[in-house]
Amino acid sequence: MFWQTFLSTFGLVFLAELGDKTQLATMLLVAQEKSPLAVFAGSASALVVSSLIGVVAGVAISKLIPPNIIQNVAAVAFIVLGVLMLTGKI
């Protein structure tokens, strides 16, 4: 079960991060700073810390709110954000 969850999480986060603004910013930083190891260490650490915050928040929220409600609220939020982006509001 651990490896199935690990691999599905890795795949989801990996695909979500490909080509996003974080990756573009990282490429820009390494081009400017000429220090690939420092940029990699900084960006990898930032992703780890932001993931840690997400996990801690998810554990806390899931103790208060049932997972199906969290999933429905997240779905509605993504739809609203998508509509706002398509209409140029954000």
Image (spheres, rainbow, N blue to C red):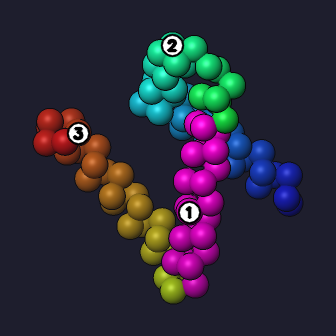
Mark in the foreground, 1 or 2: 2
Whole-Å distance between the Cαs marked 3 and 1?
A: 26 Å
10 Å neighbourhood of mark 2: few (<14), some, or many (≥20)?
few
Whole-Å distance between the Cαs marked 3 and 2?
A: 30 Å
Q: Which quadrant, please, contains the C terminus?
A: top left
Q: Which residue is mark 3?
A: 85
Residue 71 is situated, as x and y percent measured from the top left of the image, at 48, 65
Q: Which residue is mark 2?
A: 31
Residues tagged 3 and 2 counted as in contact (Cβ below 8 A): no
Which three-letter amino acid code belongs to the residue tagged 1?
Ile
Q: Which residue is mark 1?
A: 53
Callout 2: helix, strand or loop? helix
Name which residue lies at 33% across and 58% down.
77
Callout 1: helix, strand or loop? helix
> Which segment is the magenta one?
42-63
Give the image quarter of residue 7: top right
